[in-house]
Image (tube, rainbow, N blue to C red):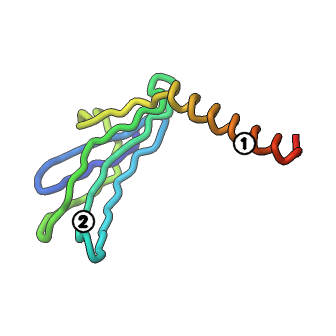
Amino acid sequence: MIGFELNINDEKVSAALENGVVSIILTKLSDEFLNSIDLDFTGLNTSEKGNGETLDWYKSQLKVGDELTIKIKDILENSVPKEIRRKNFDLENEQKLKSYYGLKKELEEKGLI
């Protein structure tokens, strides 16, 4: 599968997904409270087996002098994710129902339904 190979300070991390999204995001944040450079190598598995899980292969704050390269490659084997977060469908459905009933009540009070 086509994916990314990230080399960061001599550490190699590779990932691709058959169905889903793979992202490498480099963020520079500066304001009166924060000054950071962050690197995130993440994915969202949308396959039937993946069930919408989010995978984190690499997350770190970078510093001056860090070196990284990104290659687009045919990835034969993914690196082991440092974290996997599974989607909570029950909680999501509960939140949708709560929103639905709240909106329904509001429309009923206005005489629109």
| Residue 35 % position (x, y) | 23, 71
Indicate the amino acid at tag 1.
Answer: Leu
Question: Residue at 20% of width from left, 58% of height from top?
Answer: 61
Instruction: Report whether 86 appears left or right of 66.
Output: right
Image: 112 above or below 91: below
Q: Position of residue 67 (x, y in %)?
A: 16, 64
Relative horizontal placement of residue 52, taking residue 34 as reference (left or right): right
At 27% from the left and 36% from the top, the residue drawn is 83
Q: Quadrant of the N terminus?
A: top left
Q: Are marks 1 and 2 in contact (CB under 8 Å)?
A: no
- Which mark lies nearer to you, 1 or 2? 1
User: Marks 1 and 2, how far apart in space?
Assistant: 41 Å
Q: Secondary structure at mark 1?
A: helix
The quarter holding residue 36 reads bottom left
> To which quarter of the image does residue 32 belong?
bottom left
Disc 2: which residue: 37
Q: Residue at x 26, y 60 (%)?
A: 38
Residue located farthest toward the front when viewing the structure as drawn: 109
User: Of the residues shown, which amino acid type is indicated by label 2?
Assistant: Ile
Badge 1 crowding class, 10 Å Cα cut-off, few under 14, some 14 to 19, many 20 or more, is few
Residue situated in front as seen by the camera: 47 or 63? 63
Considering the image in quadrants, where does the C terminus appear?
A: top right
How crowded is the residue under tag 2: few (<14 C-alpha within 10 Å), some, or many (20+)? some
Q: Measuring from the top left, give residue 99's x and y in whole percent.
A: 64, 39
For residue 85, what is the image quadrant? Answer: top left
Judge from the rendering whether residue 94 lies leftward or rightward of residue 52; answer left or right.
right
Location of mark 1 (residue) = 103
Identify whether 73 is placed above or below 64: above
Q: In x, y percent, where is residue 10?
A: 11, 53
Front in this rendered view, residue 83 or 103: 103
